[in-house]
Image (cartoon, coloured by chain):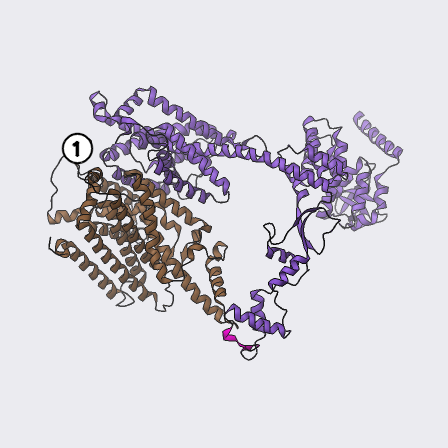
Amino acid sequence: MDRSFVAKNPSVLVFLAILSLFTLGVTILSEGFGIGVISTSFVKTLGKTLCLCLIAVAMDLVWGFTGILSLGHFAFFGLGGYMIGMWLMYERTRLIVVDSLGQAEIPPTSAEVVDAIGIQIFGVVGSSEFPLIWAFSHSLTLQLILIVLVPGLLALIFGWLAFRSRVTGVYLSILTQAMTLALALYLFQNDSGLRGNNGLSGLQNLPGVTTSQDVVSIWFLWASALALGLGYMLVVWLVSGKFGSVIRGIRDNEARVRFLGYSVEVYKLAVFTLTACIAAIAGALYYPQAGIINPEEMAPIASIYLAVWVAIGGRGRLYGAVIGAAFVSLLSTWFTGGQAPDIPLGFYTIKWVDWWQVLLGVTFVLVTLFAPQGIGGLFDLWTDRRHPDRHGANLGPDDGALREKEAIE
Amino acid sequence: MVRLFLAGLAILCACLTANAQEADLQPILQEHQEIIAKSSRKTIKPAIDAIASSGLPQAQVMLETWAAKNMWMRKSDGLFFSGQKGEGRSYELTDFDTGEVVGTFEKTELKQLKPNSGIRAMIGTALVQFQLTDPDRARRQAALQSIQRDPEGELLDPLRASIDDEPDADLKAQKQRLERLLTIGYDTDTGARVAAIEEMSDDLGVDVRAALNPLVVTNRQAAATLPSDMNIAAVLQPDSDDLSRDAAYDLLVASDLVAPRVSADDIRAALAANIDRGRVEGVPVAQLSSAAARAQAYEALAEAGAVPALITEADIDAALAAHVFFDTYAEPSPDVTAAAAHALEQIELKVGLNQTLDLTLDAISLASIYFLAAIGLAITFGVMGVINMAHGEFIMMGAYTGYVVQQFIPNHTLSVIVAIPMAFAVTFAMGVAMERLVIRWLYARPLETLLATFGISIALQQLAKNIFGTQARPLTAPGWLDGAWVLNDVVSISYIRIAIFVLAMIFLGLFLYIMKRTRLGLEMRAVTQNPRMAGSMGINPGRVNMLTFGLGSGIAGIAGVAIGLFAKVTSDLGSDYIVQSFMTVVVGGVGNIWGALAGAGMIGFLQKGIEWMNPSNTLAAQTYIIIFIIIFIQFRPRGIIALKGRAAGD
């Protein structure tokens, strides 16, 4: 038990090394700091992918390790984006407004400045008043705290309600999906105070920063890589200790862990809330790179895609989640971006823009059926790790320790 | 030959009688010759009135001719004729009174009368009285409709006169009703109006409310003293709930009784206009960034007399105390307004009751849509415990099947009858294939079933997009389902919704029959309770699971046809219903068809109820529904109708 954290988890070193090399490589190849081989928009795509990897790590913790298939983590991701977006939009509009009012003969009062910002921001939804939820948008510090606080609180309340009444399995999945849908529908309304379906825009411009997007994109790449590295280490540390054993126990046999005297609900709630916070941080880094956030991003389908990435990458192993998110989201960008070459069949030309979703869906079914270990399972072949041959196939993390035949009997 | 002779005789007789009455139209026209020729909307009224009130039968023809721009004036003597275009630039003129052709004239000798739209509208009004007694029923009907559209006091007398001679009972009732409504609005006798209002005060018609509402419209005014010659609805106290302080003062400003307040913008503009070497009355411009400094500088300006003084709170108090505020009715008679207000109150109560009924019907209809969407799920998820995220796509496939069938069978009734079994067959086959290929490998892994079926769902959605395109496809309902069952002006429900309700009930019966009365249902229940035991009894669990899943999917396909009839058929049709369907099953209670019914009922009523409270915002309704469901699950985690005992499983 005296061995150091890294010695217990050698894969962390490998992961951090690859992440640093990747970040360094992109920096050298970028337009902002290097030789300009990689375009700024692609740097942004890579930065966004790192954020998606971070939320995939969170998803793996909550699904792969604790067995809660949450279909709502993209809601927390989006909320994080909204929280940082509020400050970015407020501050940038304030600078513009102060600048333009400064041209007038009489210097503006602070009330006039706030009114003008309100008109600028809420003009699109036919309002000019600041809703209550923008109360802290003038302060970066407060808004940064809110990034973690708001999704964390939402997860805490929702999780408390759900776990307290022992909602488990697919019911919980449907409930989380319903929560996401409710949140998205709420934000779609104009009177939600977050500009309805217009969302928040212009987030790529940092207020007061005049350097070009080439450089800013690299800053965000570094920040995303740092967040991913820290988040990964945190989660590895969590799952490698006693806490990790307990949550794996909950995944494999919740009742047994409860009878051993552990407060299952508290553990689940802790994991659910923590992963919501990680997702929110990922979102807060993602949306300034995307430039725009609207409620469409939080639709339930996004959260299901998150589960797809983690499943394809390989549940129950953190690097699997990272690989899955990076692989599928980059591939998706490539296919839907129209870069993939069409395949002419003579009578019909397969356009990948149209057929990518079909391919993804079918692949996903095949992975679920034939390779429950996902891409991460390939590493088992490489390290020559074999699973004991017990009765029938692996049931996957939800029914955990039991094998198929044992479960049916 | 004989006929011609008779016709000539008839004309002769007509002329003789006209002569006998010594009333020709032409003299009347000549009396107003100047203003008719001038054709100005402002001055034409006496001429039209004189023609309309002449009571001559030919007046109608003359007015119609005039409105159709076929009336011509002979320049030589100023007489008016009906003109018919002849050869070249000549016109054949016909006398209005005799109906005889007076001759053909060149266009240069004539002047065409071209009434503008305003005059034509006045002619139309004048014509109504003729049309009300027209022998053609359709024209009388049209006249009534025109009065309904555009009621006017002048039409009251001709309308009354026409009632007694009306042969058609239906039209007579319409005329009497219209007469009451016009009496309310335009009769000169207050007593008659009050009587008419009281008579109509138990009528739900929109037209009654439209007639009554203008009577109780009020106008908010302010004055130094309360006027005695106005019909005052209420005297208002400023700074109360009815009239805020600001609104009261604004009212005084609008009535030009006091000086307007100096707004923040005015102050800034005044300061900007009075900058003198970087200072305003000694205050440096740079310091004017606070409201207090601006007020100080402005007051200094006001003392110097450069700008109007600020209105202080004390000024406002004084102004409010010195004036009275009141609402007045536009209608001068207090009896009428009181009767109208009372009648409206009574009508509102009845309308409220009927709206509740209407809302209930709407809710039932919405509930049956949800039930229809969820019933297939109640089988696959509720009975088998298989979570099928592609359920919505089965609904979509059913709707597209209906669309494809309509491409081949143009008759809408027949095509829907064909589409229902077709949709069942297609989705049944699809469901069986899916169960055999994917789901049966995942029976013990529910979360993976969820994900795998989701994969199928996105693949199917994209396939539908690739095949049918992204635009909505029409699935047209048969003609006999168009329209609505109208109980009165408030309560109505479209036939298609009734049909969906009936369909939902049929499915409920069918489901119960299959589950309780057939061999398959028995086997299904046995397999879902204990597959091993069922297997020992000689049931093939694999086959039963396959058929059960196929049945659930097939019903989803039929639901798709029904939903496609009123919704647009698009590739994401199904995903609009999937969450609601799961909610319906979960809220109602898994494993029980009555649960799905109760769940659908609850969600339908709840959604309509919330929409009623906030009608402009259906998004909010859906949000609150979901929040309600999340909370509801806290108290009844197993749904409204929970299975008890062994059947409840874990």
Is residue B285 visible to us here? yes
Residue marked by disc 1: A405
Few, some or many C-alpha atoms within 10 Å of disc 1 (few <14, some 14-19, many ≥20)?
A: some
Please state the chain letter of the residue tagged with numbered disc 1 in the rendered image: A
Q: Amino acid at mark 1?
A: Lys
Q: Nearer the viewer, residue A45 or A320?
A: A320
Q: Position of residue B413 (x, y in %)?
A: 47, 28
Nearest the eye: B339 or B114? B339
Q: Which chain is brown?
A: A
Q: Is residue B281 magenta?
A: yes
Identify the magenta region. Answer: B279-289
Horizontal side of B122 relative to B524 (left or right) equals right
The purple chain is B
x and y percent of residue A219 in the render?
29, 64
Residue toward you, B462 or A196: A196
Residue at 39% from the left image edge and 45% from the top image edge:
A182
Residue at 27 percent of width and 56 percent of height: A50
